[in-house]
Amino acid sequence: MGSNAADKAASPASQYAVEMRHITKRFPGIIANDDVTLQLKQGEIHALLGENGAGKSTLMSVLFGMYQPEEGEIYRNGRKVSINSPNDANDLGIGMVHQHFKLVQCFTVLENIILGVETTRHGILQKDEARKKVLALSEQYGLKVDPDAVISDITVGMQQRTEILKMLYRDNDVLIFDEPTAVLTPQEIEELMQIMKNLAKEGKSILFISHKLNEIMEIADRCTVLRRGKCIGTVNVKDTNEQELSRMMVGRDVQLVAQKKDATPGDTVLSVENMTVPSRHHKIDAVKGVSFHVRAGEIVCIAGIDGNGQTELVYGLTGLEPVSSGTVTLCGQDITHASIRQRSQYLSHIPEDRQKHGLVLDYPLDYNMVLERYWQKEFTKGGFLRRAAIRSYANQLIDKFDVRSGQGAATITRSMSGGNQQKAILARELDKDHKLLVAVQPTRGLDVGAIEFIHKELIAERDKGTAVLLVSLELEEVMNVSDRILVMYEGQIVGQFDPKKTDPEELGLYMAGARRQEVKA
């Protein structure tokens, strides 16, 4: 560790802040990085692009000292370095915001930010100076957080801000952002883009992992593309376009706009009347007397800025939270107070938080594929699970939905990439018998090829007569896939729109609360 610090101090001038040369990293059954070379220039924003499971996060985890490569070398400012742990990386000025947050749930925001670099005096933790620095950073970069809030009580977006502040607090000058916009609202994404540009102007070097081609085109100077663990090439962003980047990433042309015919809605499948859901975190209700309906053969999208009651609305519909008043009717049955298993006979749910509500991370993939069906005759006999039948069924879904994992159906789900965890949930939920599909951020963290596939699947569900309720923070997705748009603001539905007759600017005004309609169910 000391030698690393010495190397940093004695480094000669180099045009590269970081060089990763011929990195190879293997896991059981898979080569995650296969002879990958990446060069990050001083003061540039360098994008790392690739499909789910292409090896992007693994490569960055090697740079951050979380994994040790079997082959290859890392150079910092022209000097070869050994990074054996995240502490070594921090000593070298390298910080990382992880895709799946590294936060202690029962600690406060401030305690998480200072964890590992605490200031003490006579053995007593000194929080006042740290608080001042955190508040100054959050004000400077527009990342306003409550330093005393407990992590388990704040939104996913606020947890993301905490991760970014954790890195800025350590004064790192090589900053790794692993899918930083996946959980942010459009406004927060714009703010983050500006923050990253300002950081680069200050001389910081940024590695930016993203699946979102428009973000890469807007912010990155150069882009390195990985496909199935191999480096396909590095391009200057100003000399390329979204279609070329998607072709490099997937290996084929991708439809960036969903193709669909007009909807032909049938009978009402879901009817919500004056539903109120209390907030976990505040005394006020999160959902306030909401009424709407979804018919067979249509995609209705709930749009809004994160934190305006969409999460609690879905919890009320799916049984994850109790409804304090109002009624929820599904397929003519009152399910307002029904159990989750009773609802699951008619309803499939792609949850917002895949790790908390979608998967049992320490189960193998095949068990996760039958979580909602394991008691059925197909998978159980005489009270015992039919392992061979479960494994066979899981393998069918893995093939159909291109879920990539090192050891197939036997893979422990925690070890899979976030995008492939998401695809596993999609496979399970879409394959179930259902009349209503509730899809919350279904393409979050997915690459353009997977997004294309998921949008086609949602439209196919609609076309075969399923009622689809889509909840999305992605305005492009909202405009592209929906047949009808409901905008939610402060726990109420404030506007209803035909995507053919509106635009993102109008939706944005309703999402911000600047306009409001009287919406009838």
Image: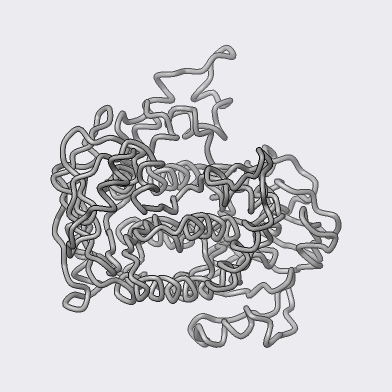
Q: Quadrant of the C terminus?
A: bottom right
Find residue 321 and report its horizontal and vertical position in percent: 74, 48
- In the rendered image, residue 260, in percent from the top left (x then y), is placed at 39, 71
In the image, residue 499 above or below residue 155: below
Q: What is the number of callouts on the image?
A: 0
Quarter residue 219 falls in: bottom left
Q: Residue at x 67, y 49 (%)?
A: 126
Q: Does residue 316 appear left or right of residue 187 in this picture?
A: right
Residue 112 can be seen in this image: yes
Task: Let me know if residue 401 appears in the view.
Answer: no
Q: Quadrant of residue 506?
A: bottom right
Vertical arrangement, residue 389 with respect to residue 21, above or below: above
* Structure colour scheme: one colour
Q: Residue at x 71, y 54 (%)?
A: 149
Residue nearest the viewer, comparing 11 with 275 = 11
> Extreme top residue here?
382
- The residue positioned 51% from the left and 18% from the top of the image is 385
Residue furthest out toward the front: 122
Q: Nearer the viewer, residue 262 or 111?
A: 111
Left or right placement of residue 278 versus residue 29 in this view: right
Q: Quadrant of the N terminus?
A: top left
Q: Position of residue 46 (x, y in %)?
A: 27, 65
Camera-side residue of 105 and 457: 105
**412 lies above or below 83:** above
Q: Nearer the viewer, residue 335 or 502?
A: 502
**Picture coordinates of residue 231, whole percent (x, y):** 16, 52
